[in-house]
Image (cartoon, rainbow, N blue to C red):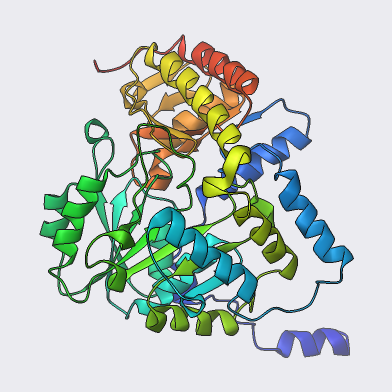
Amino acid sequence: MSKAESSSSDQVKLDISLSPRVNSVKPSKTVAITDHATALAQAGVPVIRLAAGEPDFDTPAIIAEAGINAIREGYTRYTPNAGTLELRTAICHKLKEENGISYSHDQIVVSNGAKQSILQAVLAVCYPGDEVIIPAPYWVSYPEMARLADATPIILPTLICDNFLLDPEVLESKISEKSRLLILCSPSNPTGSVYPKKLLEKIAEIVAKHPRLLVLSDEIYEHIIYAPATHTSFASLPGMWERTLTVNGFSKAFAMTGWRLGYIAGPKHFVAACNKIQSQSTSGASSIAQKAGVAALGLGYAGGEAISTMVKAFRERRDFLVKSFGELEGVKISEPQGAFYLFIDFSSYYGIEAEGFGKIENSESLCRYFLDKAQVALVPGDAFGDDSCIRISYAASLTTLQAAFERIKKALISLRPAVPV
């Protein structure tokens, strides 16, 4: 044995274990499926990708030009950790004019996307052992963010017949002395449901009874909404400003997913804590993206014509899919009032043996079946806390959606519902 080999064999084995906190977190299925579908497409497989939650539109030209000009003009240095005064002032104006909630610039923190804003909020307000109340179906990251904060996610199921909206009585029955945070998302990812103002008022009445309970209102899809539905910011309700953390951003409405820009607004005490966490992690958001954000908020109320054009296209796509899937046997649909997702109940097809594939047991196996037989990438509902459904993103052209529907319909021809709907 050589000297090097002898030395190597005498070494203590390296400890490659990971922290319990990381081991408690599940990887994002939406990211995994999107990456897998992208790899298949790059390998030449004609996969239609309807898994990712991002608009298929380009960033409006005036916003893109603002980013380009920022680079050309040398606006490429660090900004204040909480964001530029220019952008935070513009956000304050937007929240006042569009949402009816008033903040000063020191009650805003700009981050690298709304996801970072949400995580920092959860980390800032939760004690180990606290409970985070999350209505299901939920965005995949909410429960995992709670776990990262050593908190316990408390999942409250909702029903498709109730348009996946939280029942206030169910909420009231689940609140305990450990309840610290209620997360609401309207319009919702993955269901597209929009909370009516009267329902939010009932929820607010319950929340008001519990002095430790805060609300995180995720409003990232607020502008992608279909009349007659309207958006209500939770913080605008009587007595809720003091206990609400409002999260929003630029990714969805302004087609700026890659720019990575979001923000949180709330009472200074909580927002300052978020700012502290950000100062020791990523520091401020991109200076270039922030200039683009200012341009986005300068487009006018609710994003002006550029955004209304996108919303009109989303509505046309939604209408096509709701009508088309509604004509299929064994399918249940709650018509979305916002966002760009359909959350369809295909559970009547579970238990069926698919020729050349195997048994369809749940949402994950049905998604694998669609990817294998129809070459359409969708996201299983179990990732969102409801295994009976599958999420379809209609952030794709109408032509693409028409082709995807025909593929799915063909893949279902040989399947018959195991139970009546």
Give the residue displayed 57% in from the left and 46% down from the top. 303
Q: Can you say whether 368 is above or below 157 in the image?
A: above
Quarter of the image where one finds residue 401: top right
Q: Can you say whether 28 is above or below 77 in the image?
A: above
The image position of residue 150, as x and y in percent, is: 37, 75
| Horizontal side, residue 201 vs residue 95: left or right | left
Give the residue displayed 52% in from the left and 18% down from the top. 408
The image position of residue 182, as x and y in percent, is: 28, 62
Give the residue displayed 46% in from the left and 9% down from the top. 413
Q: For the N terminus, which image quadrant?
A: bottom right
| Horizontal side, residue 193 vs residue 210: left or right | right
Q: Can you say whether 296 is above or below 122 in the image?
A: above
Q: Is residue 50 visible?
A: no
The front one of 353 and 13 is 353
The front one of 416 and 118 is 118
| Horizontal side, residue 208 vs residue 83: left or right | left
Quarter of the image where one finds residue 416: top left
Q: Can you say whether 388 is above or below 256 in the image?
A: above
Q: For the C terminus, which image quadrant?
A: top left
Quarter of the image where one finds residue 75: bottom right
Mark count: 0
Q: Can residue 153 be seen in this view?
A: yes
The image position of residue 377, as x and y in percent, is: 58, 32
The image position of residue 390, as x and y in percent, is: 42, 33
